Image (tube, coloured by chain):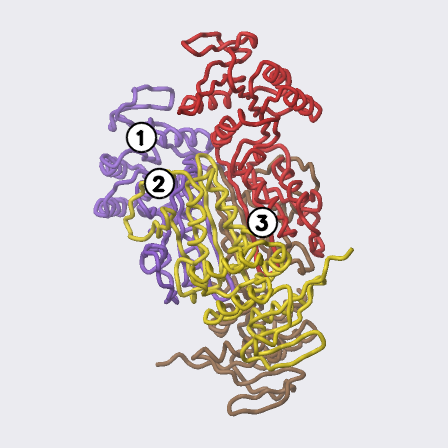
Chain colours: A brown, B purple, C red, D yellow
Amino acid sequence: MNTPNKTVIIAGITGAMGQQAAELIGTLPDFTLVGGFAPHATPQAKPNLLITNKIEELPPADIWIDFTVPSVVFKNIRYAISHGYHPVVGTTGLTAQEVLELQEMALHDHRGGLIAPNFGLSAVLLMKFAKEAAQYFPDVEIIEMHHPGKKDAPSGTAIATANAINANRDLSSPSNSTETIAGVRGGQVNGIPIHSVRLPGYVAHEQVLFGAPGEALTIRQDSFDRKSFMAGVKLACQKVTTLQSLVVGLENILD
Amino acid sequence: MNTPNKTVIIAGITGAMGQQAAELIGTLPDFTLVGGFAPHATPQAKPNLLITNKIEELPPADIWIDFTVPSVVFKNIRYAISHGYHPVVGTTGLTAQEVLELQEMALHDHRGGLIAPNFGLSAVLLMKFAKEAAQYFPDVEIIEMHHPGKKDAPSGTAIATANAINANRDLSSPSNSTETIAGVRGGQVNGIPIHSVRLPGYVAHEQVLFGAPGEALTIRQDSFDRKSFMAGVKLACQKVTTLQSLVVGLENILD
Amino acid sequence: MNTPNKTVIIAGITGAMGQQAAELIGTLPDFTLVGGFAPHATPQAKPNLLITNKIEELPPADIWIDFTVPSVVFKNIRYAISHGYHPVVGTTGLTAQEVLELQEMALHDHRGGLIAPNFGLSAVLLMKFAKEAAQYFPDVEIIEMHHPGKKDAPSGTAIATANAINANRDLSSPSNSTETIAGVRGGQVNGIPIHSVRLPGYVAHEQVLFGAPGEALTIRQDSFDRKSFMAGVKLACQKVTTLQSLVVGLENILD
Amino acid sequence: MNTPNKTVIIAGITGAMGQQAAELIGTLPDFTLVGGFAPHATPQAKPNLLITNKIEELPPADIWIDFTVPSVVFKNIRYAISHGYHPVVGTTGLTAQEVLELQEMALHDHRGGLIAPNFGLSAVLLMKFAKEAAQYFPDVEIIEMHHPGKKDAPSGTAIATANAINANRDLSSPSNSTETIAGVRGGQVNGIPIHSVRLPGYVAHEQVLFGAPGEALTIRQDSFDRKSFMAGVKLACQKVTTLQSLVVGLENILD
């Protein structure tokens, strides 16, 4: 009685993430890559594997991994759901309205799927734990550290963490420290101070600091390399065919 | 419709923890301290509060907080359960056999209670999160840091953390590093290396380090002061009357 | 050939720091406490020790430790220098003008002394190392963490650290990160971002983060208790009689 | 009045470090690469640059950067010193006896040079600061963290750090903690406990933890990428022509 083998196609198979995903699937005994799609792919057919630049040529499969671009992701996932694929979406850029429309399609077809803005398990677990800890530690600050080339401050993950914490905490006991230099106390999201550090050598890191009388709890995650996302993609592939709806957020399919 | 007020007695009310617990109950609007018990207490009766050195003189109450000593805790809790109190036990020293016997008594009487080796919420959450993270990050090491006066290494919390992690993880990918100096790779509990630091200035701290390709997750807790235990005692008092059995471990009554 | 024994008087001997200093001197074999001064001290004379509330009654001594209050420190130290004591000053509140005047007096009398805004060795070493590292790592940010009761943000030590770093660094390569939430990039002192965290459980902590391509250097100090200042006072007493001028800053008498 | 331009040859120019060094020299306005040497190099002569596999064909130059292999480094550096080059040696494998012999040659010829087991500035500064701090903080432990593929534990840098600390510290006050699990207190170098962590995701990191009553000082360095070594090579090139002897250790040419 083997685990039934699942078939996979990858949209965006020529991109950096798509290539890593293809490599990942190649190492997983229970999954088989049967198709790849990319607008500039050179069409080729090996035994059991079709690479194509025409979406309608793709073979049927259990899972549709999508690492494409914002301009095509909505069209891709609509196609995937309506053609019987379970989507695993790492592409960003879907609007709230588009996500809602896709979720309704998926619900109607009883088709499970996952849209994950972040496939990094350390970041996803940090958010999950921070939300949980906030119930007992309402006093909290966030420090995120990135390379100097990052365009925005704070990071999207830091904002998402603050929102998750806030949804789950009681009244905090704010400090009365007066800023003698503007900005030192950070910027606030829902009353939670966020501090953004930008230094060469750093990649992508986040710390959540909780304090209470006589004790402290700190959760930290470090992302050194995008290859870390593949552990999240693997987890998504293992669970997506058992889901009953189009779930948003890797944290929502963790046990 | 008010929250019904709950009555509390404290065994060991003259000790350091007992006094802090009495102070805590005094600050909680929904709880009333009605009795205190200690072998060397000077008996005194104020309106609605009786301090005594005779256990049988204690008034009935909803909750029995116990911060006594190993030699009497078993007798105390047996008395508490059989006399209708919900026990909240911070005293250490109960044997596994004694815990089992108390749990059977509690089950028979449908009386909920809590035995908590550690009332520090940061330590309890660290263990809970570490256990959960281990499912996704099987490669892990523990570093605990304490003051030089601590008698044993590793700490009981570090051992408990390693056991919790091990119960929940897949096969790890162990390092092949060869020790050129014996001991540098730490001591192992279920294959998980534990490193114990003993330095002046430190109080009681624990870090759990998880690593995976391209990312890391670290959970750290710091206990600076025993007053931090009172947040755990408060939580226990809020939940103990709703429990159906004698639970061991504060982590098992967290939501 | 013994180390010659040195005599000490303590101004402010009834205050918290003065009492700790008296206790410290009592444990040092090469130093003898011969006098204590405080406005509200109960005058008493033990063999070899005079406690008084009249400054002119104080016996001569090698060292004048001053833990008094801003309103009297200037008068005290002027008295100390002109009466042949080597001052070790932990009292804050001297103006720049007063420091200068005292330094001129000390120079004229060839009398060494020390004014130390911070006797915490970990903080002083952090500043020294940060200054030194800045020469090789111009890209740097500071994070300081204190209890919520601290009135100002950032801490004086953080500002002093930024100034020390700035005096010693080349041009940094600033990040272009745009703040989408005002304040997240901290407040700047000489172009160095400072981030101030205020959380219960924390006492007084500072981190200096240096980053460069492919590497990072972090220096952190934690002050848990004012008793840590006594190691700095001891060091000052050991060196002050060999100084040729009135030095400002414990870091300037480190080897 | 320009800084006089200095000429450089690189031995081992075809290796990974040699190539990075060549790239570095290309970006420095005051240095010119005039030659490269490697046994398997394809000989080629561009204007002002000669790549060769015959050592005697190399043009004269101010500086000889060596990133070769243990079996040839001694012969190379002997050649460099006797032919008027200032050596900057990143190759490992010289024996103590060989280093001594090279130092005598260099002394005789008044030729400055540098042998650096570690060109990582963060690691070198960590060692320097740790040595300095040990004078004031005799109680210390070292934690080093590396990827699981590292063959030995502890790291060479951790041993070097312990030796540097030990040369500079007073008696420490050791803990009496008893190991209930062998190894948890680490392995000792000169009485200093070293703890080695081996986890995927980590690259090369070291922490030195100092503790004293009421305070703690921690120095940490992270090496993410070998490209970080180039800052040290640059510094060496800038200073080597002003040295009067063959110095061992980048820390000894820091200001």
What residue appears at the point 67 percent right and 60 percent down from the top-left corner? Answer: A149
In the image, residue B105 lies at what x, y percent? 24, 44
Q: Which mark is drawn over residue B12?
A: 1
Front residue of B75 and B202 = B202
Disc 1 secondary structure class: loop
Mark 3 neighbour class, 10 Å CA radius: few under 14, some 14 to 19, many 20 or more: many
Frontmost of labels 3 and 2 is 2
- Viewer-side residue, B138 vs B174: B174
- The CA distance from mark 3 to mark 1 is 40 Å
The residue drawn where x is 37% and y is 81% is: A2
Are dots 3 and 2 on a single chain?
Answer: no
Taking the image as shown, residue B196 lies to the left or right of residue C237, namely: left
Find residue A142 and name its label. Answer: 3
Quickly name the residue at label 2. Answer: D174
> Observer-nearest residue: A217 or C111?
C111
Q: Amino acid at mark 2?
A: Pro
Residue at image point 64% right, 41% down = C164
In contact (CB < 8 Å): disc 3 and disc 1: no
Q: Position of residue A38 (x, y in %)?
A: 64, 82
Task: Choose mark 3 or mark 1, whichever is in front.
Answer: 3
Which kind of residue does numbered mark 3 sit on? Answer: Ile
- Badge 2 marks a residue whose secondary structure is loop
Give yes or no for contact between labels 1 and 2 (Cβ–Cβ under 8 Å).
no
Query: Does B242 appear above or below C179?
Result: above
Q: Identify the element where label 3 is drawn.
A: strand
Q: Residues within 10 Å of mark 2 (few under 14, many from 20)?
A: some
